[in-house]
Amino acid sequence: MAVIAVDLGATSGRVVLATVADGSVALTEVHRFSTAARQTDDGLRLDIEGVFAEVQRGITAAVEAAGTPVTSVGIDCWAVDYGLLDADGALLDEPYNYRDPRTAAGLAAVRERIGHDELYARVGIQDNAINTINQLMHDVTSGRLARAARFLMLPDLIGYWLTGRAVAERTNASSTSLLSPVTRDWDWDVIDRLGLLRGVFPELVDPGEVVGTITVGAAAGVPLVAVGSHDTASAVVAAPLLRTGDVYLSSGTWSLIGMELDAPVLSEAASAANLTNEGGVDGTVRLLKNVMGMWILSEALRTWEAEGSPEELTDLIARAADVADAPRFDATSPALLAPGDMPARVKSLVGGDPRLDDPAMFTRSVLESLADAYRDTVDELVAITGHRPGRIAVVGGGCLNWLLCRLTAERTGVAVTAGPVEATAIGNVLVQARATGLITGTLDDLRRIVMNSFPLTHYLPRPTEELAVITALSNEFGADPAFTR
Ligand code: LFR
């Protein structure tokens, strides 16, 4: 029995074929393609129909590779972006990417109608220009929304094209700032006050519900299962958290760092810390912060490449390990959001310090600043929830960045476990597998399957002392001491 996960990330999408058996899960990537937005005369846009064609190609490849019946398909994607359909169900135009600067005007227009404090107390979402609410508000003022009959978040849009059923999966709907984390329904009052047209919002479904039967392509007849369709919700499912208060850090284009809770925290302190209450799988709340993440480095690499000096990330990390006293900056700064000349922007955040012209120093500066932001966020989470983390579970591509993992452990004083890299696809698969009866259990049980299936690397807060202890133990018991760097 095989499961197909469609996982759309900010730069690339993948289709993964998975098997779940005997308490473990195994993944094979069968197709990868670009999901990059493109600058058009009319803003930063996504060719979502092109992405859908790649998704179908991937599903075909997965069905062919499976050699056994496929039990279900699930889709996850980055949050906040959406497509609009007209009255005939056709796509109105290409979706905007959240890094398009139109959000500034949208945010200002939202503010005129609802103050931040009131909005936060209602929907619990951090103040971030990228939020759907700001994008939709811009669509109201530009007249775009008036031409729409249906609003669908991107993974729901792909699900609609596969099954013909239009729904809004809850974890991703929570990223719109239009969902109440208390009632878990659309906040119709906010929607009315912003003039957002009630009729465009589809019915909500939870992860684990069957959206419908796929009617097109190689997987026709197979159920489409709603997963944590916000990629971060799926990643948190597969983060090896052991107890309440453990911190996850989903490390990719963004760094999403937070705790999994049973209930939202809508207090002034949470608002002042700019923590967000996004919906998680099984009715959990992901109290977290968006820190800028590996985007800073990937944009810098793009700039250097355009200037003719290609740098490799792994080389940079190795060289950055030997750099001392790098300047630090606020890694949550909105100045870093839009695409563009990242080295120049970071340099201006550190007062023009010329040492940042050296890519190794630049890299060290970014990693130190990210680690600072993680420490500050962990401190805020502890103060606000009263829970102390036993570990920080770093998942996603950034868990391969050993220097960042090491700095994170040292700076926060909390042990880091790094892995699995493909947490998002794994979380997607496990929620499907549970929905179709291949496995049973709580989130803890799903995480046990993850820990059983993938190796983790451990980084301890005080490496020198701890290495001495581990070496002594290994000399005595013959265990492998190589689990810390
Ligand atoms: C990560 C992510 C974040 C969200 C950002 C924009 O891929 O989904 O959780 O804040 O992208 O959608």
Image: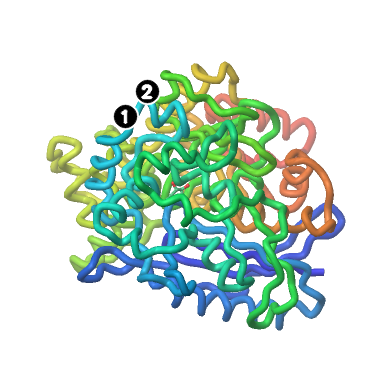
Q: For mark 2, what is the residue? A: 272
Q: For mark 1, what is the residue? A: 115
Question: Percent from the top left, x then y, of residue 360?
Answer: 29, 49
Residue 159, above or below 350: below
Q: Residue at x 66, y 32 (%)?
A: 471
Q: Amino acid at mark 2?
A: Ala
Q: Residues within 10 Å of mark 2 (few under 14, many from 20)?
A: few
Q: Nearer the viewer, residue 190 or 216?
A: 190
Q: Nearer the viewer, mark 2 or mark 1?
A: 1
Query: Which element type, helix, strand or loop, lies under badge 2?
Result: helix
Query: Which element type, helix, strand or loop, lies under badge 1?
Result: loop
Q: Amino acid at mark 1?
A: Gly
Q: Residue furthest right?
A: 22
Residue 470, above or below 343: above
Apparent side of residue 141 relative to residue 247 in the rendered image (left or right): left
Question: Percent from the top left, x then y, of residue 96?
Answer: 34, 62
For label 1, being within 8 Å of ligand 1 is answered no
The C terminus sits in image quarter: top right
Question: Percent from the top left, x then y, of residue 328?
Answer: 27, 34
Q: Residue at x 36, y 61 (%)?
A: 312
